Image (cartoon, helix red, strand yellow):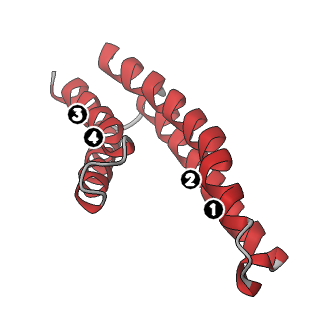
Amino acid sequence: MTFFYIAASLIVVAAIFHSVQGERLLIRPTLAVDDPFIRRPMTQAIIRFGWHASSLFMLMTAILIVWPGTPVTLILLAGLLWLTLGVTNLLMTKAKHPGGSILSLIGVIILAGYSL
């Protein structure tokens, strides 16, 4: 169970970082581009919503892995998802984006807690 709490803590930190720094470093500059499609209010709302919704889904997995009575299969799937997303991020960005390492680490910690 300790591994799950460690992973959940890392997920919370990652989700907060993702929302705050993503808004500052990615969302705002992207939405400031002088492109008619990007300038549409609907486009801007969807981009911002999608970004922050993914942070909320991160938090949901943190809750899921420490919630009493969560089926172990669901915890296993959460660990596999985090690891898969992390490895995919590492491959797609050629390991230049720090998110891949963190996501992979979270997945490994969840899987370690599942297997121990």
Q: Earlier in the sequence, mark 4 or mark 1?
A: 1
Quadrant in the picture for the N terminus: top left
Mark 3 Cα shell of 10 Å, populated few (<14), some (14-19), many (≥20): some
**Which amino acid type is shown beneath numbered disc 3?**
Val
Secondary element type, mark 1: helix
Separation of marks 2 and 4 at Cα, in angstroms: 17 Å
Whether residues under marks 2 and 1 lie with C-beta atoms below 8 angstroms apart, the answer is: yes
Whether residues under marks 3 and 1 lie with C-beta atoms below 8 angstroms apart, the answer is: no
Front in this rendered view, residue 113 or 11:
11
Q: Which mark is residue 54?
A: 2
Residue sticking out furthest to the left: 115
Residue sticking out furthest to the front: 34
Q: Earlier in the sequence, mark 3 or mark 1?
A: 1
Q: Residue at x 52, y 27 (%)?
A: 13
Separation of marks 2 and 1 at Cα, in angstroms: 6 Å
Whether residues under marks 2 and 4 lie with C-beta atoms below 8 angstroms apart, the answer is: no
Mark 1 Cα shell of 10 Å, populated few (<14), some (14-19), many (≥20): few
Please state the horizontal and vertical placement of residue 60, each as a whole percent of the image: 54, 41
Q: Is residue 98 left or right of residue 113?
A: right
Q: Which mark is residue 108?
A: 3
Mark 4 Cα shell of 10 Å, populated few (<14), some (14-19), many (≥20): many
Q: Earlier in the sequence, mark 2 or mark 3?
A: 2
